[in-house]
Every structure is written in structure tokens, then in C-alpha cells.
Amino acid sequence: MKNRVKRINQLLGLVLITGLTGAAYEVYQTHQIDKVNRALMSGEVVNDEHYPFHKKFADAYQQGKSGNYKQATQGFGQLLDATKKLQQDDVFEVSTELKSLIHFNIANNLFRAGLQRLVAADGAIQEEAKFDYLQAKASYEQALKLDPTLRAAKFNLSLLLSVIPSNIKTVAQERSGMEISNLPQGLP
């Protein structure tokens, strides 16, 4: 009987130690998540290597805030590619709201980049600005398709549509690669 009580006490002590260790770990994780959330809410760059997706999002957002719209758009584009890869690898399900916010941020940076472009001497919008505006329009529409309740995207899209003419057309952007007749590109 005495050995049985001793074993039960040892087992309960082990369960208590395991529970306390688990609770301490959860408190630590909650603290880390809270720190990352505070950094994201204040617009700071996340330096925690355990959250690469959030770090990339914050970095792209900071690029846009500092006026580097092209780099910000590229950063958010990489995030879209990362969300596709994460879903394909079944790492986690990326919410449509998050994808919508990424498209919204891409559109904002393209819109600002278009506004930064100068108007041509005859008063016409430069081709680069037209391209940026059309891409921003497509991104706002994609953001609204994913999350129709995103009011900021609705407002910014209406603002964009008031800035650009309704009959805007642009020439196709040049491809970065060079084709030589019908030879295949790349290595075999």
C-alpha cells in the first residue's frame, strides 16, 4: 500500500511538472506572438526569425511607407507566391482576408507609383503610369473579389477610377528576356 501511494504521488508529481512546463512554454509563446503583433501594429519591421512571413510583410510595408513602391510591390508579390507555396505544401491554410490584404497593399503601392510619375509635355499620362494604374485597378478588383467587405479597397478603387480616364489603354510592356528567332531559351 505504501509503495502504491508513493508511485501515485510520483506519477502526480510528474504530471504536475509536465503541466507547469507546458504552461510556461505557452506563456513564452504568447509573449513572443504579442511582441510580433505589437511590431506589426506599429509598422515596425519584425526581426524575429520564427515569423518569416510576417517579417516579409512588415518589410514590404516599410518599403512602401518610405516611397520604394517598386520594392514594396515586389515584396508583396513574393508574399503572394509564398502563400501559394504554403498552401501547396499544406503548411497552413492562408485566409482569403490575408490574400485580399496583400492584393490591397500591392494596389496601393502601384497607385502611388503611378501618381509619382510625371505627366508628359502634352498633358497625357506617361505609359509607365498607365501601366501602374491598370495593374493597381486589377489588384484592387482582386482584393475585392477575395473580400468584398474591404471598404478601404472600395474607396481606393473609386479614387483610382476618378484619377484615370475611362478609355485608358497602354502598350504592352517589353519582355525582359530576348528571343533569337525560334531557338529555345535556357539550358537543356
Image: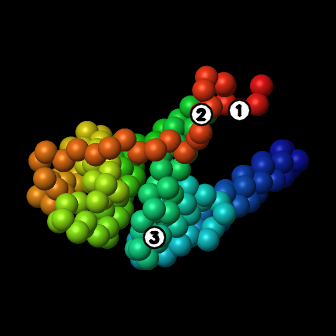
Tell me the CA gap for discs 2 and 1. 11 Å
Q: Does 180 sit above or below residue 115?
A: above
Q: Position of residue 144 (x, y in %)?
A: 24, 44
Secondary structure category for the residue under label 2: loop
Give the number of the mark in front: 2 or 1: 2
Q: Does 70 sit above or below residue 67?
A: above
The residue nearer to you, when weighing 7 against 179, is 179
Q: Amino acid at mark 3?
A: Asn
Mark 2 vs 3, N-terminal side: 3
Secondary structure category for the residue under label 3: loop
Residue corresponding to mark 3: 68
Secondary structure category for the residue under label 1: loop
The residue positioned 46% from the left and 44% from the top of the image is 174
The residue nearer to you, when weighing 41 against 17, is 41
Q: Position of residue 73 (x, y in %)?
A: 44, 57
Mark 3 vs 1, N-terminal side: 3
Residue corresponding to mark 1: 186
Q: Amino acid at mark 2?
A: Glu
Give the number of the mark in front: 2 or 3: 2
Tell me the CA gap for discs 3 and 1. 31 Å
Tell me the CA gap for discs 2 and 3. 31 Å
Residue farthest right in this picture? 3
- Name the side, left or right, on which 78 lies relative to 24: left
The residue nearer to you, when weighing 186 against 58, is 186
Q: Quadrant of the N terminus?
A: top right
Dot 1 crowding, Cα within 10 Å, few <14, some 14–19, many 20+ = few
Dot 2 crowding, Cα within 10 Å, few <14, some 14–19, many 20+ = few
Q: Amino acid at mark 1?
A: Gly
- Name the side, left or right, on which 28 lies relative to 87: right
Residue corresponding to mark 2: 179
Q: Position of residue 82 (x, y in %)?
A: 55, 45
